[in-house]
Amino acid sequence: MQEDESDLSGATPRRRPKPDVLEVGGRRLKPATLMMGHGFDPALSEGSLKPPIFLTSTFVFENAAAGKRHFEGVTGKRPGGAEGLVYSRFNGPNQEILEDRLSIWEDAEEALTFSSGMSAIATLLLTFVQPGDVIVHSGPLYAATETLIARILGRFGVAWLDFPAGAERHEIESVLERAKAMGRVPLIYLESPANPTNALVDVEAVAAARDALFGDHKPPIAIDNTFLGPLWSKPLDHGADLSIYSLTKYAGGHSDLVAGGVVGAKALIDPIRMMRNTIGTITDPNTAWMLLRSLETLELRMSRAGENAARVCDFLRQHPKVESVGYLGFLADGRQADIYRRHCTGAGSTFSLYLKGGEREAFAFLDALKIAHLAVSLGGTETLASAPAAMTHLSVPDERKQALGITDNLVRISIGVEDPDDLAADFDQALAGV
């Protein structure tokens, strides 16, 4: 979105008189390089190397005609959002620069950022779902997502059907056929790897099943890509239409902010933007600025954490008090290994650890940790560990938890960027007390 140079304001770093450099010498620049300056012209902000934080609630229009044009975009009279800055519930310089850069990682047409991962998911669902619809999703999902679909939307006559994360195409088609018979299917919602079991969804199989059954009126496929994206998984390349993030996790990476994001095709992003404009779920300027900082080191942090996880998991799977380790790097054969080879470029740094025993043993292990922190969340520079059945997924009914493999002996671990030998020593001493 480019304005004439005469419309530029020195207070607006998003509007720039010349296009960004996307390639050099015929070589397309990688995301890690573009994170250092894409979407921002220092000349428009007093030569500042980094974008300033724009703490303002409203923006001054160049003239009345410009104000009308901007509001035509905000209210949907013209697609694509406002041509300029209007009001901080709709847009802002920090948010727009962040969205420019976020879209680059998955080579998406557009991106939107939100006040949290759940506000991103809620805004997405409110955009596409109507009373009486039937949502089809993979299982398990993050507990708050399941609650939003089953309990909150359920109050408005919305039903749901699910299929296991590792389901094959014929199983997915069977669920989709049942859903079609029940009502309109507005959305297929996936989470891969699943939280907290680390089970993978075959996005290509979901897309093929959807295409075979729905003809020209295909429900969009949205996927929570928080665990592996955007470095190790790019689901838009495999048939998904929208990729969703808790930017709190790897994108933020320092456990000091809460935010969410959605990237995908402009035709789908535009209506989500309209819903965000209405209900006000946009991220704030300070959080957007912090995310711009974090995206500069995203590849470095995720790569180091991934290397650490591989070494730590090698140690853990040989320990006599460990029942199994749900680490994607250990997949050697079978359906999950096939999905991993086709969809992923790395195993990530978050995994499920199943101890021999139950809740008592899991709690004893967690309470004995010295370096790793007993806390929920993931993707930070520090190592975190938690008990999903008793914490993040406590609200999920017991019978559903058992069916999905969310057992009392399951510990979810997110490896950080500490020294891997120190982490192995910490897990070793904690297991000694179990």
Image (cartoon, grey):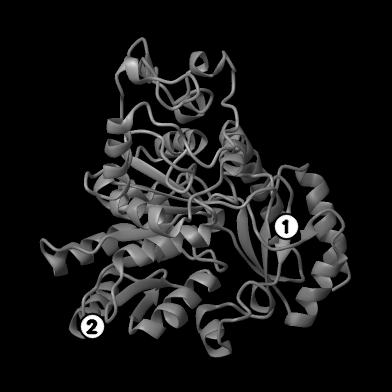
Amino acid type for the residue under numbered disc 2: Arg
Mark yes or no: residue 354 visible.
Answer: yes
Check the image and report above or below for 124 versus 12: below
Give the SS element for disc 1: strand
Q: Residue at x 40, y 78 (%)?
A: 153
Question: Residue 384's mark?
Answer: 1
Residue 302, quarter of picture: top right
| Residue furthest bottom as drawn | 399
| Residue furthest left as drawn | 216
- Give the image location of residue 297, x and y in percent: 61, 33
Amino acid type for the residue under numbered disc 1: Leu
- Give the image location of residue 281, x and y in percent: 48, 56
Circle 1: is it few (<14), some (14-19), or many (20+) Cα within 10 Å?
many
Circle 2: is it few (<14), some (14-19), or many (20+) Cα within 10 Å?
few
Mark yes or no: residue 338 visible.
Answer: no
- Give the image location of residue 126, x and y in percent: 36, 66
- Give the image location of residue 45, x and y in percent: 54, 19
